[in-house]
Amino acid sequence: MMVASELRSVRYKTAMRRTSLSRPISSALRDKILRRDRTFFDYGCGYGTDVEILRASGHQTDGWDPYYRADNELSETDIVNLGFVLNVIEDPEERVRVLKKAFDLARICLIVSVRIDSAFFEDCFGDGAVTKDGTFQKIFTQ
């Protein structure tokens, strides 16, 4: 059985390599929440695919990730994305702190996305589970 510090140390493994925008960001563009006249910040951006694609299409974007883009600063912007970040935080109190911090950074809108399926669980841990890859996932319900 893993302990919290081991799970914290492998959070970076949950970052996904993508070639297109994530579903939350695609939805924000479609719904005109995210526009070129609004700044965008991806809090927990992983590899930064959304940031790079948006930047290439003329959006004012930046992102921060504790593993992949730790040198970037957290910054207040119009739209903040907290996409699939809360799922990988095994400590409920830390989850609340991160959510509050992301909310504080958003001037217009905070986009929050979480996983809602549980098909890949291996072991229960706290209020979530450990995956086959050894990472923590908190699965939320609607």
Image: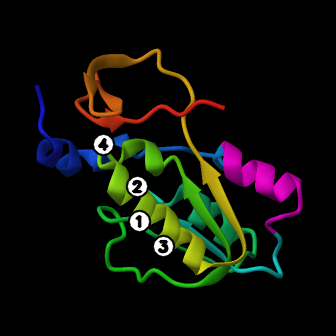
Picture layout, residue 101 above or below residue 107: above
- The CA span between labels 1 and 3 is 6 Å
Estimate how packed mark 2 is, as few (under 14), some (14 to 19) or many (20 or more) residues with alpha carbons within 10 Å.
some
Mark sitting earlier along the chain (3/2): 2
Mark sitting earlier along the chain (3/4): 4
| Residue that carries the numbered disc 2 in the rendered image | 95
Q: Quadrant of residue 39?
A: bottom right
- Report the mark closest to the observer, 1 or 4: 1
- The CA span between labels 3 and 2 is 10 Å
On the rendered image, what quadrant is the C terminus found in?
top right
Q: Secondary structure at mark 1?
A: helix
In the displayed structure image, the side of residue 107 where residue 136 appears, left or right: left
Q: Are marks 1 and 4 in contact (CB under 8 Å)?
A: no
Tell me where residue 82 appears, x and y as whole percent: 55, 58
- Report the mark closest to the observer, 2 or 4: 2
| Residue that carries the numbered disc 4 in the rendered image | 13
| Residue that carries the numbered disc 3 in the rendered image | 101
Extent of the magenta region: 23-34
Q: Amino acid at mark 3?
A: Lys
Q: Are marks 1 and 2 in contact (CB under 8 Å)?
A: yes
Is residue 84 a member of the stretch shown in magenta?
A: no
Q: Amino acid at mark 4?
A: Lys
- The CA span between labels 1 and 4 is 22 Å
